[in-house]
Image (cartoon, rainbow, N blue to C red):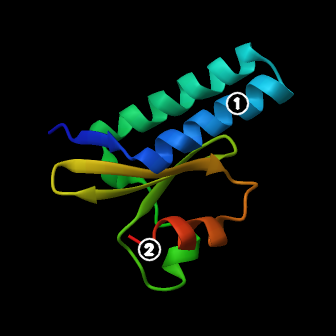
Amino acid sequence: MKYDVIVTDGALADLAGIDDYLSASESIDTATYVLDALEKTVRSLANLPNRGHYPSEFAELGIQDYREIEWTTYRVIYRVDGQHVYIYVVASARRDFQALLQRRLLSL
């Protein structure tokens, strides 16, 4: 059964920020490579969305509404609701994820 993957405005802004950062600090080729890989990772959730694990920041609080998958140093935070997979965050694991998740997800 295939799920609909919906990328939220916040996650789209994350991807644009990753593109801007990598284009400026690395190269356009690097940015393209990373974005293509992240988009492939996101699209793969249409087939097996429940394979991700619970983000440790939420698991410690007993919150099991969100899952995450990783690609190299990037984390994709999402929620499965019926036949839909909502992508909320795409960010480097080097960021302060506790603050990012609280700001982005707990305010929903």
Instruction: Please name the residue shown 35% across and 70% down the image.
Output: 65
Instruction: Please name the residue shown 69% across and 54% down the image.
Output: 93
> Residue tagged by mark 2?
107
Q: Position of residue 27 (x, y in %)?
A: 80, 18
User: In what element is the residue under mark 1?
Assistant: helix
User: In what element is the residue under mark 2?
Assistant: loop
Q: Considering only vertical position in the picture, is 102 above or below 7?
A: below
Do we see residue 75 in this rendering?
no
Do we see residue 98 in this rendering?
yes
On screen, residue 63 versus residue 6, left or right, reads right
On screen, residue 64 versus residue 68, left or right, reads left
Q: Position of residue 91 (x, y in %)?
A: 62, 48
Instruction: Please name the residue shown 28% across and 57% down the image.
Output: 80
Q: Position of residue 84 (x, y in %)?
A: 22, 49
Q: Considering only vertical position in the picture, is 86 above or below 24?
A: below
The quarter of the image holding the C terminus is bottom left
> Residue tagged by mark 1?
20
Label 1 sits on what residue type? Asp
The quarter of the image holding the N terminus is top left
Q: Which mark is residue 78?
A: none
On screen, residue 42 versus residue 55, left or right, reads left
Q: First in sequence: mark 1 or mark 2?
A: 1
Instruction: Please name the residue shown 64% across and 72% down the image.
Output: 98
Mark 1 and mark 2: Cα distance apart in space: 26 Å
Label 2 sits on what residue type? Ser
